[in-house]
Image (cartoon, helix red, strand yellow):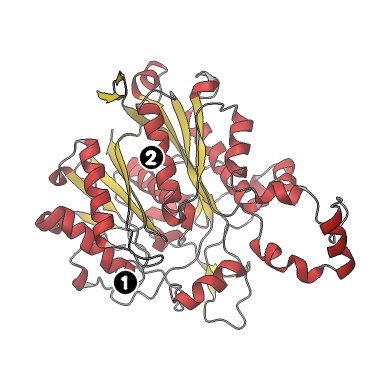
Amino acid sequence: MIRMGQRTITIRDVVITGFGAVTSLGHAVGIETPDKTLPSMAEALLEARNGFSEATLFATEEIPVKKAAEVANLEDALDRKALKQLGRGQQLGVLAAEYAMIDAGGVQGHYDPYRFGAWVGTDFGAISLKQWATIWEDVSDQDRHLVNQKFTPTIVNGWTPTWVLKSMTNGCQSHIAIRHQMLGEGSTNSQACAASTLAIGSALRSIQYGQNDACIAGGTSATVIDFFVAGFLPLTTMSESGNHRPYDKARDGFILGEGAAFLILEEEVMARQRGARCYARLRGFATRGDGFNITAPSAAGSAATIKAALEDAEVEPDEVGYINGHGSATQVGDKVEADAFHAVFGNQLESIPVSSSKGAFGHLLTAAGAVELAATLCTIAKDGSLPPTVGLDEPDKGLGLLPVHPDVKQKLKKPVFIKHNTGFGGQNGTLVVEML
């Protein structure tokens, strides 16, 4: 129990009863696929495959980056209304949310809609930002004047007010809430690459403290476009080799990816009363800031976040059986992350397996944490296996980590694991999960 003002609140237990994902690697309704014609994310993960291909969503002719992790044939899985009315990131998110609802089996309509919230981590909205960046180049001086004076739906070469709706940062959260009548406490998070981790943590808190009885929480990102590539290239964070190799000696940056994942969270007693399958218990969460640098991460900030999450979960470091890390595959990022793990776990880190799922489906930015957590649940729930560090060839011994090699299957030996993410601006988020 905790004191909040004049009230004493009993902290309620929260379980994960469903999850869904859409990535370049495949689709997932829990550990299954929604349709046999669609690729299976679970199978691809267990086979240590990646979803990288020659980029089609941004021009590669004059830049050294040639590959991306794009979701193929998205239109085959969506209804016509979604294709017409939603931006790409919203489409990915709505589809992944639908998968999560299906996997949770019977959660729709079971709860008071005013106590069922939607929490989403996302970025700029999900219309192609290339279109925003170039719009004025395609508009005549006369049309610009008209736009400034009075906007009409036929102005600007076919641009209509629907483009505003497709670009809303909270658009995905809104569409999910409308489609599934989730009227409870919820919000949109936009804390760079930690956004969806923080969205899940916020949903956890809302159930623990009694504001909601159930939530859908996760993230979506559709930023495989020229606009973002142009921003990342000068920072030398993207891989020119065409491989995303977390914790590898020869790592040279990340592969930009797109996708979405959502989890269904429920108050445990109520979930079990309705006969829900419980994959895991979400034990704890913490977020802390670096206050250090707008792009460079801080080991101190990440370590403080992980320690706070373990304390929140009432879990000791020696109880952790696995770490699903951020693994951006940059030289600096992976080193700082490893330093943070050492600061928290000390010598115990020698026996804790670590992996990053980004080697399979790239860096999904704001959706990274949710998709990586879904991937972890996917492989462990499927056959007890830890998700491999796809792309890893020769581990960087200087990091002092025990990475899960793609050629060697490892099982989860202790039920508790952590999911950690960092983001530009110094945002950190850690979730503590116990498999059931």
Local secondary structure at mark 2: helix
Q: Where is residue 257 in the image (x, y as percent from the top left)?
A: 51, 61
Q: Which of 158 and 136 is in front in this view?
A: 136
The quarter of the image holding the N terminus is top left
Could you tell whether 326 is left or right of 179 in the image? left
Q: Position of residue 189 (x, y in %)?
A: 49, 45
Could you say which disc has been placed on residue 332 in the image? 1
The residue shown at (21%, 47%) is 307
Q: Which amino acid does label 2 sit on?
A: Gly
Q: Quadrant of residue 59?
A: bottom right
198 up-or-down from 64: above or below: above
Q: Do the CB atoms of the residues marked 2 and 1 lie less than 8 Å apart? A: no
Mark 2 — residue? 201
The residue shown at (37%, 58%) is 426
Local secondary structure at mark 1: helix
Q: In which quarter of the image is residue 198?
A: top left
Q: Nearer the viewer, residue 164 or 102?
A: 164
Counting other residues with Cα less than 10 Å from the Cα at mark 2, is it few (<14), some (14-19), or many (20 or more)? many
